[in-house]
Amino acid sequence: MFYTGIEVPNWAVFLDPTVTTWISELDDLRYDRVAAAIDMLTTLGPSLGRPLVDTISMSSFANMKELRVGTCRILFAFDPKRQAILLYAGDKKGAWHDWYRQAIPIADHRFTRWLAQESGGGP
């Protein structure tokens, strides 16, 4: 059965400039897979779950998540406006646990900066 006349809202997704750069440097196959995952996030928003999205437990933010595409990870969070903010990206191949120790503090810092900026309190 098909429904017509119902608009499915798309969720706003913002990328930190470093994430944009990282994505642009991927090979074609990984680029396509990461772009497809971001498209899914844009379509499904906070309801997107495993296996594509999982919660990050070591973050200062309870709502910090990771977009999972093979060994590639993009840490992100939804802000109070329910916009997805993609904060840090990388490939954790060969550094499964160390990657998080490096990435999470950076993502937390960037999200703190984003929240301050959105509330009018930051650059």
Image (tube, grey):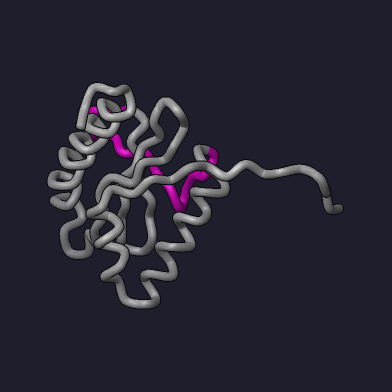
Most foreground residue, 46 or 99? 46
Residue, x 23% and y 30% (percent of image)?
112
Q: Which quadrant is the C terminus positioned in?
A: top left
Most foreground residue, 4 or 50? 4
Span highlighted in magenta in the image: 47-61
Residue 28 against residue 78 in the figure, above or below? below
Residue, x 17% and y 52% (percent of image)?
99
The location of residue 76, given as percent across then percent down, is 34, 42
Residue, x 50% and y 38% (percent of image)?
46
The location of residue 121, given as percent across then percent down, is 24, 22
Asked if the stretch drawn in magenta spans residue 115, the answer is: no
Q: How many marks?
A: 0
Q: Quadrant of residue 71?
A: bottom left
Residue 71 appears left or right of 98: right
The location of residue 75, given as percent across then percent down, is 30, 46
Residue, x 84% and y 53% (percent of image)?
2
Magenta stretch secondary structure, dominant: loop
Residue 84 against residue 31 in the figure, above or below? above
Residue 77 against residue 102 in the figure, above or below? above
Residue 3 appears left or right of 14: right
Which residue reaches farthest right? 1
Most foreground residue, 78 or 94? 78
Q: Quadrant of residue 104?
A: top left
The location of residue 64, given as percent across then percent down, is 33, 36
Asked if the stretch drawn in magenta spans residue 56, the answer is: yes
